[in-house]
Amino acid sequence: MSRSIAKAGAIVGAMLFASMFFGCASQQRVQDRPIGWTQSGTACWYGGEFDGRRTASGEVFDQNKLTAAHRNLPFGTYVEVTRKDNGKRVVVRINDRGPWKSGRIIDLSRAAAERLDMIQVGLVEVTLKVIRTR
């Protein structure tokens, strides 16, 4: 019996540690940024197979809305995205997490990518600017 209790205690302890570790890690990644904060890098877009699925915020993804995924900006943050080579701009609301490929800073919905004229090229260099926080 004491062996069962010890095993159960170890499992509960491991679960508590994991929930504290992963819970804190995900909370620490989210970073409030002031209005005017900028970031430059590579943008990509997503749609199709993700349309209708739940985003990290719990919202259903709609590729026809002006939304985006960012690794650590809070959900509900509005960001102006400017394509560097043609100057086209779009304002998106952060409602998902990503992109998870190295070197990319934002995943845009198909609608946002269309506004930047990047559907065919897929990846473009952009500057993000926080224009409204949640």
Image (cartoon, grey):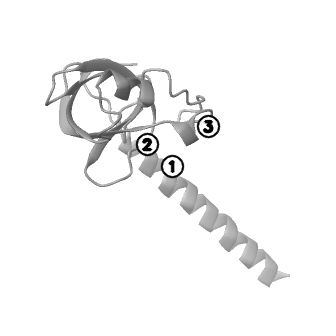
Q: Position of residue 3 (x, y in %)?
A: 78, 84
Amino acid type at circle 2 is Gln
**Image quadrant where one finds the C terminus:** top left
Q: Nearer the viewer, residue 80 or 15?
A: 80
Q: Secondary structure at mark 3?
A: loop
Question: Mark 3, residues whose alpha carbon is within 10 Å: few (<14), some, or many (≥20)?
Answer: few
Q: Which residue is mark 1?
A: 23
Residue 47 is at least partly visible in this image:
yes
Query: What residue is rendered at 32% in x and 41% in y?
Result: 122
Q: Secondary structure at mark 1?
A: helix
Q: Which residue is mark 2?
A: 27
Q: Which badge, 3 or 1, is on the more N-terminal residue?
A: 1
Amino acid type at circle 1 is Gly
Q: Quadrant of residue 117?
A: top left
Q: Which residue is mark 3?
A: 53
Kindly check if marks 2 and 1 are in contact, taking CB atoms under 8 A apart as contact.
yes
Q: Nearer the viewer, mark 3 or mark 2?
A: 3
Tell me the distance, in whole angstroms, between the alpha carbons under discs 3 and 1.
23 Å
